Image (cartoon, rainbow, N blue to C red):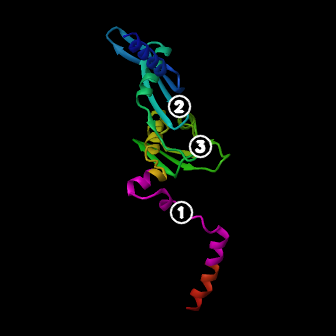
């Protein structure tokens, strides 16, 4: 019995370890009209992630700011999604996400580019662990819509391993061959052009 309690205690300690970082994206003062007047409160929007490919967002309302942030953080941890990253730093391919009037375009970027994105999108990428990405928001500038659109696009990401598994092939069959250099391929095109003109 004592051993079982000890195991439970260890499991609880593991669960409570702060593996997620969080970022407060927006906080608004909201009001509810009641018979006696207005009751004021706060609404918080929080993004959490482990900076290793998992991210989620949540929103919470309360009469005090700390309580609203706590509620939003708890909800965000329940809505975590996993996103495959290339080399642990950027996206595998360009992708577009939509939610309502919000639309975002995200492009993979070479090493050293950094996070080129604004406001709420930057928070998502930082919590996800992306180091190089170029992103633009087109349409709604509402932070809720921007984050939902960003996560919609990120959930469309697929790695070569996932594509190979879906198609029943090996990863080597999916990826382009690297036998010849770009210079050789240009040379073969230039050689082929006169032959086509003669024909």
- Helix, strand or loop under label 2: loop
Residue at which label 3 appears: 89
Q: Nearer the viewer, mark 1 or mark 3?
A: 1
Which one is earlier in the sequence, the residue at label 2 or at label 3? 2
- Helix, strand or loop under label 3: loop
From the top left corner, tell me how far across and down residue 138 is, in percent.
50, 46
Give me the residue at 59% from left, 64% from top: 178
Question: Dot 1, crowdedness within 10 Å: few (<14), some or many (≥20)?
Answer: few
Residue 30 visible in the shown view: no
Magenta region, mostly helix, strand or loop?
helix
Residue 109 is one of the magenta-drawn residues? no
Give me the residue at 55% from left, 91% from top: 199
Is residue 40 placed above or below 48 in the rendered structure?
above
Residue that protrudes farthest toward the left in the picture: 35
Give me the residue at 42% from left, 17% from top: 7
Which disc number belongs to residue 176? Answer: 1
Question: Dot 2, crowdedness within 10 Å: few (<14), some or many (≥20)?
Answer: some
Q: How many marks?
A: 3
Q: Report the span colored magenta.
A: 162-188
- Which of the 4 image quarters holds residue 114? top right
Which disc number belongs to residue 50? Answer: 2
Residue 164 is one of the magenta-drawn residues? yes
The N terminus lies in quadrant: top left
Residue 104 visible in the shown view: yes
Which one is earlier in the sequence, the residue at label 2 or at label 1? 2
From the top left corner, tell me how far across and down residue 78 is, in percent.
40, 27
Which one is earlier in the sequence, the residue at label 1 or at label 3? 3
Gap between marks 2 and 1 measured at Cα: 31 Å
From the top left corner, tell me how far across and down residue 167 is, in percent.
39, 57
Gap between marks 1 and 3 measured at Cα: 21 Å
- Helix, strand or loop under label 1: loop
């Amino acid at each position: 019995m004592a051993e079982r309690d000890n195991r439970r205690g260890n499991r609880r300690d593991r669960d409570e370890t702060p593996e997620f970082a969080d970022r407060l994206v927006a906080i608004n003062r909201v009001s509810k009209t009641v018979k006696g007047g207005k009751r004021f409160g706060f609404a918080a929007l929080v993004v959490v992630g482990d900076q290793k490919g998992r991210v989620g967002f949540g929103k919470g309302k309360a009469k005090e700011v700390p309580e609203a942030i706590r509620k939003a953080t708890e909800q965000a941890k329940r809505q975590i999604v996993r996103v495959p990253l290339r080399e642990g730093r950027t996206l595998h391919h360009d992708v577009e996400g939509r939610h309502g009037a919000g639309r975002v375009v995200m492009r993979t970027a070479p090493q050293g580019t950094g996070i080129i994105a604004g406001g709420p999108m930057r928070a998502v990428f930082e919590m996800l662990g992306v180091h190089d990405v170029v992103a633009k928001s087109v349409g709604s500038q509402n932070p809720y819509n921007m984050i939902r659109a960003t996560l919609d696009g990120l959930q469309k990401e697929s790695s070569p391993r996932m594509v190979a598994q879906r198609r029943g092939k090996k990863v080597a069959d999916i990826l382009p061959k690297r036998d010849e250099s770009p210079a050789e391929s240009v040379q073969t095109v230039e050689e082929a052009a006169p032959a086509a003109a003669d024909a």
